[in-house]
Image (cartoon, helix red, strand yellow):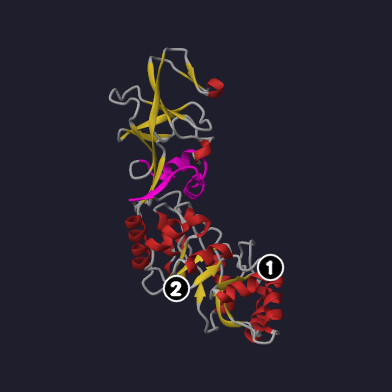
Amino acid sequence: MSRPIQATVYPAALQHNLALVRARAPHSKIMAVIKANGYGHGLLRTAKAMQAADGFAVLEIQEAAALREAGIHQPILLLEGLFSADELPVAAQYGLSIVVHCEDQLRMLEAAGMQPGAQQLDVFLKINSGMNRLGFIPGHFWGIYDRLKTCRAVRSMTLMTHFATADETAGVAEQLSRFTALTENIALPKTLANSAALLRYPETQGDWVRPGIMLYGATPFHDQSAADLGLQPAMRLASEIIAVQALQPGDSVGYGGLFTAERPMRVGVVACGYADGYPRHAPIGTSLAVTGKRTRTLGRVSMDMLYADITDLPEAGIGSPVELWGADIPVDEVAQACGTVGYELLCAVASRVPMTDS
């Protein structure tokens, strides 16, 4: 018998969430962000499920090539652009779009444009409107813009930026103002909105929106749940109880003896640990569901196992199903308990965990 842990991905949920994006941004094209192996859901699996997207965004050229080889014909954007000039002919071969966010990348294009028979690429010019991660600062924008306009390796240009606090109370006003002041009189396509921005700030939606986390049924906000936004979870991480321990008052469980029973208790040992992607730092009391009923974790998560309180679940025993996150236990709830975000948990599901569609 194989180890019972399994991740299940729901294509219908991905399609539902994509349709919600379409409804919330009806005048924009959708660039579905499927980097990080489709946020842990599988690159090709997510692309296939979301074929109604107008384009896809990934990080590495190998991901983009895999999508093209699988028959994906929509625009594919490399979100960090090219990492070396060697990637230019590959990008041209597969008809990829590239972000240009620094001088080195611009020089690559200019050098390519000087070669006989230079091939052209669609370029997304990234403006650093205040996040200070990638992009050209406003003071350098016009010089960069003029160089790209005259570069023979550039077929088309789209202007883009990325918001630092669209999911927080600070909002997007300052960054949006900077971007608008630079670009409002330029008749080129624009893309600004990630999941948080397209949901809360429709004025940022532009010609393209770039949803990520909402496609996978998790919320970009700490104060609004995915269910409240109408999103459906696209992944369920589940396992089973593989052993049961009876504790007496004073008994501890797990490494470090972090939890000590104050009354007689039953503990279910679950086949899931940090080597599967479940966070080791999940505190005692993190929610999970056993036989469809909510309960809590006990003790410290170990490499291959964690502990569930089944004291008040007399029907639970060896073989009982356990949901770590999914429809009953939102991934965002687990993430919040662990002091992180749903993005991290979804992306961290280990390769040793079998993943299937439903």
Residue 197 x %, y %: 46, 63
Residue hosting label 2: 73
The image shows residue 355, relative to residue 116, as above or below, that is above
SS under mark 2: loop
Q: Nearer the viewer, residue 2 or 345?
A: 2
Q: Residue at x 42, y 35 (%)?
A: 3
Kindly give the residue lying farthest to the front in the view shown. 1
* Kind of residue indicated by mark 2: His
Residue 335: numbered disc: none
Residue 24 rendering spot, x and y as whole percentages:
36, 66
Q: Is residue 153 visible?
A: yes
Crowding near pointer 1: few (<14 within 10 Å), some, many (20+)? few
Instruction: Name the N-terminal-most of marks 2 and 1.
Output: 2
Instruction: Name the quadrant of the N terminus.
Output: top left
Please state if 233 lies on the left or on the right of 220 as rendered: left
Residue 107: x and y, percent? Answer: 71, 76
Residue 277 in the magenta stretch? The answer is: no
Quadrant hosting residue 48 = bottom left
Q: Note whether residue 230 is visible.
A: no
Report the residue marked by disc 1. Answer: 84
- Decide which of 313, 163 is in the foreground and name it: 313
Where is 204 relative to 322, above or below? below
Tell whether position 347 is magenta. yes
Disc 1 residue type (three-letter): Ser
Point 49% across, 34% down: residue: 273
Query: Which segment is the magenta one?
Result: 329-358
- Secondary element under disc 1, as helix, strand or loop, is loop
